[in-house]
Image (tube, helix red, strand yellow):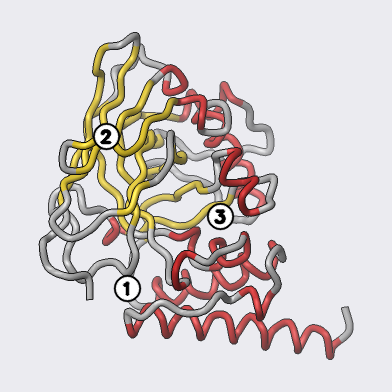
Amino acid sequence: MTPDSMTTADSMITAAVQRLRTAERTRVPCAPIREFIGADDIDAAYAVQQVLVADRLAGGARIVGRKIGLTSPAVQAQLGVDRPDFGFLFADMDVTATGIGADALLQPKAEAEVAFVLARDLDSPELDLNTVRDAIESSWAALEIVDSRIADWDIRFADTVADNASSGLYVLGDRLPADIAPVDVAMTMSINGEIVSTGSGDACLGDPLNALLWLAETARDHGTPLTAGQVILSGALGPMAQIAPGDRIEARLSADGSPVATVATHVEPEQYR
């Protein structure tokens, strides 16, 4: 890459960062940022994400974990990609105790998944399924409230990666029994008592542990390995569903037909913005 092309690339990354910053600050969704960095430039997309994460850290935010996105083959096919992506979880994204505030989101959707809490770091040069399984302290039923700063969810791979993997908020519910493998669960998610999504553990890259292994290797290679105590949202077990003020969202995980864990939250009745 020549100096001129590097300057151009840097200016495009800066333009994408500024657009997403403005959307976050004004609470008004923006046009896609792929017009600056291309629809599938992975390095540029993560470069934008890293700048925005640094912004939050400089403002006093604290990283508490990661989220994995694009774990569903159907969503990957929709966006024309063959890999998941990841974003960062910050402490103020955890609304387990409070529910979803009226001004927290722009165009939210809910998805049910399995969350892991890590007992040890995952920074080894050699990682496999046994390694990541042994590193899990506990597994939980979780709701991720995904969001997008991109208007109308008009996203491609670069848009969602740059936008911290379309992150919003998350909720932890019941702990999964130790003898239940995440891949074996069936999921039912309802909004105001109406079932809106169903799925299973194997919808998440074939097994949520596969997703965790992918993230552990990727985070290590990016120089920011997963560490003990972090919360990892492993990816959706079924389709996401749009949510609105006043909604109550609940997901139930079952094994062999019997409920084993639930998670629920509510959305404050006021308008989002």
Q: Secondary structure at mark 1?
A: loop
Going from N to C along the chain, the mark reached first, 3 or 2, is 2
Q: Is residue 48 left or right of residue 271?
A: right
Please identify the residue farthest to the top as the structure is shown: 256
Q: Which residue is mark 3?
A: 224
- Measured Cα–Cα span from mark 1 to mark 3: 19 Å
Q: Quadrant of residue 187?
A: top left
Q: Amino acid at mark 1?
A: Gly
Q: Which residue is mark 2?
A: 195
Instruction: Look at 51% across and 33% down and name the residue there.
Output: 204
- Measured Cα–Cα span from mark 2 to mark 1: 39 Å
Please name which of the two marks, 2 or 1, marks the residue nearer to the observer.
2
- Measured Cα–Cα span from mark 3 to mark 2: 38 Å
Are the residues at dot 3 and dot 2 in contact (C-beta closer than 8 Å)? no
Q: Which mark is residue 60?
A: 1
Instruction: Look at 68% across and 50% down and name the residue there.
Output: 81
